[in-house]
Amino acid sequence: MEYEAVIGLETHVQLKTCTKMWCGCANEYGADANTNVCPVCLGLPGVLPVPNAEALRLTALTGFLLNCDVPGYAKWDRKNYFYPDNPKNYQLTQLDFPSTITGFVEFELGEELESVRINRAHLEEDVGKSFHFADYSGVDFNRAGVPLLEIVTEPDITSGDMAYEYLNALKSILEYGGVSDCDMEKGQVRCDVNISVRPKGQQELGEKIEIKNMNSFSGVRRAAEYEIARQIEVLEEGGQLVQETRRWDDDAGITDSMRTKEDAHDYRYFPDPDLMPHRPSEEWLATIREEVVELPLARKRRLMEQYELPTGDADVFVGDAALGNYFEEAAKGLNNPKQAANWVINNLQAKLVETETSVVNLKFPAVAIGELIGLVEGGQISSKIAQEVFAEMFASGKSPATIVEEKGLSQVSDSGELEAFCREAIEANPGPADDFRSGKEAALNFLKGQVMKASRGKANPQMVGELLAKILNG
Amino acid sequence: MAHFLTIHQLLEQLRAGELSSREATQACLDRVEKVDDRLNAFISVDAADALAQADAADQSRAAGEDLPMLGVPVAVKDVLAVKDQPLNCASKILGEFNSPYDATVIQKLRAAGAVVFGRLNMDEFAMGSSNENSAFGPARNPWNTDCIPGGSSGGSAVAVAADECIASLGSDTGGSIRQPAALCGCVGLKPTYGRVSRYGLVAFASSLDQVGPFTKDVRDAATLLQVIAGSDDRDSTNVPEPVPDYSAALSGEVKGLRIGLPREYQVQGMDPEVKAATDAAVKQLESLGAEVKEISLPHTEYAIATYYIIATAEASANLARFEGVRYGARLDGADPEEMNRKTRGAGFGEEVKRRIILGTYVLSSGYYDAYYLRAQKVRTLIRQDFLKAFEEVDLIASPTTPTPAFKIGEKVGDPLQMYLSDIYTISCNLAGLCGISVPCGFSEAGLPIGLQLLGKPFGEPDLLRAAHAYEQATDWHTHRPNLD
Ligand SMILES: [Zn+2]
């Protein structure tokens, strides 16, 4: 029998705010344990939460970036469970009225364009971090109360690869939008994977297995692949799958059971009476909509269409948004934008790397790239000279025209002057000249090179070729 | 004798230079020393800290400063966070915990120049109506020390009634200010939900709790409310409604004020003496020019059940933080779960455990809709009852409690009977109204009886106006228990 996998992901992402969700403590990674804490995030008696406006803004922005609706009413709920890292022993989250709902994420999987529907992205608070020592445990509450966005997909994912590409797409969207740094090393992204298999064609879903707290995308891919194979094997051997939570052991490359449905928590959700529902106004949402940036995939497709760039070039400009923006500036009004892309990718990017500077610190404006291309296309300089001009632009910020003029780099297109160069070359090199006359066309290139050398690169190469042939054949 | 004074009497003497804050504060401390062995209103008193504040107030006054309560000693219920003072909520579970911060109402008191002192006894975590549920032993009624003072703010009522302080703060979740005020013969005011910041008030039931004043007369209640009311950006449930001048409402004039008597409050079990005293009080208001009419609050009979579902549900989560991980008492265990179980099992008293279990139950999967959700719907109906009634009347009058103070131990074995002692006070919290209890007589046995007036949301000026006019026409508030 053929089986198919049904996968849904719940991704927790820390928002890039200055302060925590309910208090003024810094949202900062790597501080000494329990230094970014206050009565509120420690859950001392009597304290109350106050929502972080920046977190609400970033949540709505994420909603727009993920093509979600941002409903006019959202509320907070208490999720009750005891754990030492959970200061209030309830976590504030959004159960039935989340801040954003029903969107989708598009991404490329191989050659295909895939889409995964987003059920919701809701705001909640992170918990502290437990540490276990020889004979005691400790909790660092610096992370407690950090705003956390939980992004929940519909079960649209069908393979480990697809899960992997979805996560990469999600990460780049959130980074692009300035919502989160998505630093996996710092635990800013964590993922729960819900996965089941069913015979191909069957409507009914199989028993759902949840794998908790994954902190690498490749781990998710491997865990999903492992789970799919494991579940199919169980079914093929006539076994039964039960709804359960499993743990991924990254070293061993296997999952093992943590708890089954019977020991599932009853979280006793109820609306938090300390917080008022959030009713985003149209004006507020309008200001956030203005901050919505173009998403990576959309940008790639647009660059390919608008400038007729190949995939590789578009990928470079999506991967380095600043460089991409610079390219678009440079390509303005050019009839061959690919030329500009070549300059930006092959020359500019290399120079930036070499000098360890960034595109924002450039001494010359983007239009100068266009001017440089114009000089080459208009025959005023050769492409070789253009390299020299570019180096000078990079160093001094002077315009290409000024550099050509100051250094006398203008291409020689005067046929009288060029003919003199050509005759000199033929006289100095009778061998190759004879070779050409006897039919060895390649010999012309040697002579051409001699002319270019003599003119210090300023001779118009096309005219040189034509003149040499004319003289030799004459 | 300074401890017998009201806020306004004391301020007059302080301003005239006839008395210092140190003398007034020392008088209160001496009074505590003298009577509190019998009353147990205070869990603890930091005399040195109180006197240091009093000296600072005297220095400010000497430097020409004057503030609304400069130098007035105010005692606070053990449920409000005061920086560097113990915060126990009359429970064992907080152990040696001292608060590292001031509640907003404490900051406001300090800003108004008050001398904040003492930790007043209460029912553990404000759960109770008799002050018997205190890990520090029951507070006792100053009119008869065999009787309960009411609860949960029992200590706050006793301290004011017994002149151990000039005024005090308590909290009211279902009557916890008005009921003990009535039983001890002082004035107790529960402000409209959202009027006073809850930041630093240890939560029992977040959607019902409000901080409010206990005072010796209505003018003082207006003064103290003025100081603690107002918006606070640390409390999201605080309402940014402008704070009116409450003293300006004390005109003595009630002509044309419409007072409603709920038909549904004429229940069996109301003590005849209580009925007689409150009927007389309403007559008195009528004779002063108020219009009295019968009104209906059809969902009254569901109030207690609704209250005990919502309050316990919220409490079950609010009290989850007390498990000894970060602060308070801790009993070690092999794992976090065992540590929790031991710590909470030993740290909480019977009534608190009963309510946590009840609250946990009504929120449990499969029961949520039948209990919690339904209770929320009934709460809306109760609120609508009141808002509708307030289209016809300005205030609603009733007894504060169905009986005068009962004996300590009398109802301990019967929690349901105990819950019924809040029957007139509970709806006010469910509906988010304001309410006040003022002394309106005594029983044969010499125990105080209270008149409750309820006002519409943010209707405190009407409440204070009527209570003040009544007080001006009677002398019940001037009676004092004999503790010599
Ligand atoms: Zn904090």
Image (cartoon, rainbow, N blue to C red):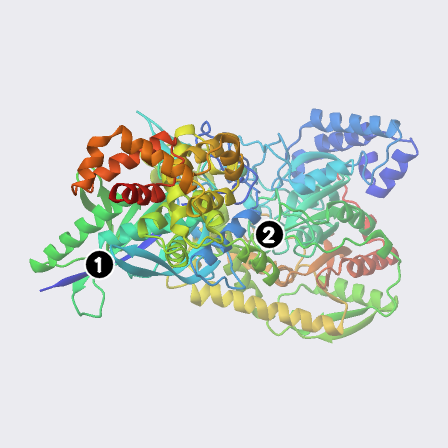
Quadrant showing the C terminus of chain A: top left
Q: Is residue B229 left or right of residue A234?
A: right
Chain letter for mark 2: B
SS for callout 1? strand
Amino acid carrying label 1: it is Ser
Q: Is residue A272 visible?
A: yes
SS for callout 2? loop
Is circle 1 on the same chain as circle 2?
Answer: no
Which residue, given by chain and number where applicable, does mark 2 sit on?
A: B129
Chain letter for mark 1: A
Q: In this view, does B426 lie to the left or right of A369?
A: right
Q: Can residue A180 be seen in this view?
A: no
Q: How far across and down, in percent of the image, does residue B190 sit?
A: 69, 54
**Image quadrant where residue A447 sits:** top left
Image disc number at residue B269: none
Label 1–label 2 contact, CB within 8 A: no
Q: Front-most of B414 and B66?
A: B66
Q: Pointer 2: residues within 10 angstroms few (<14), some, or many (20+)?
A: many
Q: Front-most of B162 and B466?
A: B466
Q: In this view, does A448 lie to the left or right of B398?
A: left
Q: Front-most of B284 and B177?
A: B177
Count of numbered circles on the image? 2
Amino acid carrying label 2: it is Ser
Q: Pointer 1: residues within 10 angstroms few (<14), some, or many (20+)?
A: many
Which residue, given by chain and number where applicable, does mark 1 sit on?
A: A196
Identity of the residue furthest to the right in this view: B16
Quadrant showing the N terminus of chain A: bottom left
Q: How far across and down, in percent of the image, does residue B410 sit?
A: 56, 52
Q: How far across and down, in percent of the image, does residue A349 sit?
A: 40, 37
**Ligand 1 within 8 Å, label 1 CB:** no
